[in-house]
Image (spheres, rainbow, N blue to C red):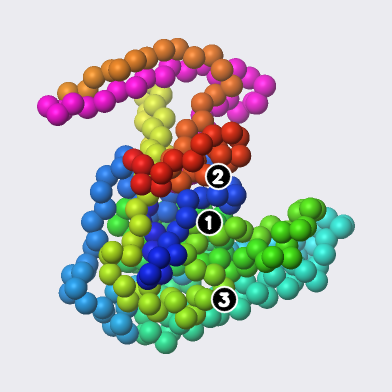
Amino acid sequence: RRNLRPPGGGGVAPAGGGGGVRGGACATGTPGGRPVRWRGGKGGVGGPRRGGSMFRRILLVTKHTPYESYMQLKNQGKAPVALRWERLKNRHDLHQQCVHAVRTALTRMGVEYTAITRDELHRQHLAGCEAVVAVGGDGTVLNTSHFVDDTVPVLGINSDPTRPEDRQVTKKSDERRSTGALCALRADNCEALLPDILRADSTLISRRTRLRCVVRSTYTETKLPPALNDILIAHPSPAAVSRFRLVLRHTDADGAVDEDFAFNVWSSGIWLCTATGSSAAMKAAGGGCMDPRSS
């Protein structure tokens, strides 16, 4: 995955805490560990474009806040009773302020952009876009990643980061703030640093490996979107036993595919992760963290 980060370090950390993706997709990625080349467009990698930005068209994706979701349920008479509406409204307002700050920065730079919510996002929205700015949290970045290929970099902005006082909260039923592990910017610095990132060159783009899952049946073959975090292959019922065959192959220098080992398995399933996903749910389950550069 290609992930934009601010100059001078402060890059994007591996996914942590922000929830893994089950059979999901990555942000802009490199399926199978393929190298990514920078797409320079007009003028190549050399110089900034209009308004000083390296990108001519940007897609701005924003999250649907918990306050908006609960308000919809409230109008239907289905909202939970014990909700702290004032706190949810405050967090909604903070998110909207961040979105406004991002819009202001893009407009000031003269960048052409289209703004949609993550619920409206479809692959057609990415046609002609050279970069995606996802404003929300790790979930927004991961949701956006379902729709991008390996030519479009993604910049995550945490619009409602966890505050020091929130770390002492034990009841988190409506404290769904994001850790921002996949976000390079936060609400308090996005307006100042966003122009610097959009003027930067390809040296500020980090790359992450993704997983590709192909589901084959007798007559069909379905390629799932590449996964940035992890893939879980299991029976829909947690109590059922899954039966599968595990095969490890490698390709030699001559292009021939050799099988290292294979065996049949009866178990609850198999869970695979990328280096990015190794620091998220996989770590919480007892796994170890991999080097982010692992392929």
| For residue 183, above or below residue 170 | below
The residue sitting at 81% across, 67% down in the picture is: 85
Measuring from the top left, give residue 43's x and y in whole percent: 17, 74
| For residue 41, above or below residue 226 | below
Kind of residue at badge 1: Ala
Q: Confirm whether residue 216 shows in the render.
A: yes
Q: Are marks 1 and 2 in contact (CB under 8 Å)?
A: yes
Instruction: Describe the element under mark 1 as helix, strand or loop.
Output: loop
Instruction: Describe the element under mark 2 as helix, strand or loop.
Output: loop
Measuring from the top left, give residue 86's x and y in whole percent: 80, 71
Q: How many marks?
A: 3
Left/right placement of residue 174 relative to residue 281 reads right
Frontmost residue, 107 versus 46: 46
The disc placed on residue 188 is 3
Left/right placement of residue 130 relative to residue 185 reads left
In the displayed image of the protein, which residue is found farthest to the bottom? Answer: 108
The residue pinned by badge 2 equals 280
Kind of residue at badge 2: Ala
Q: Quadrant of the C terminus?
A: top left
| Residue 210 occupies quadrant | top left
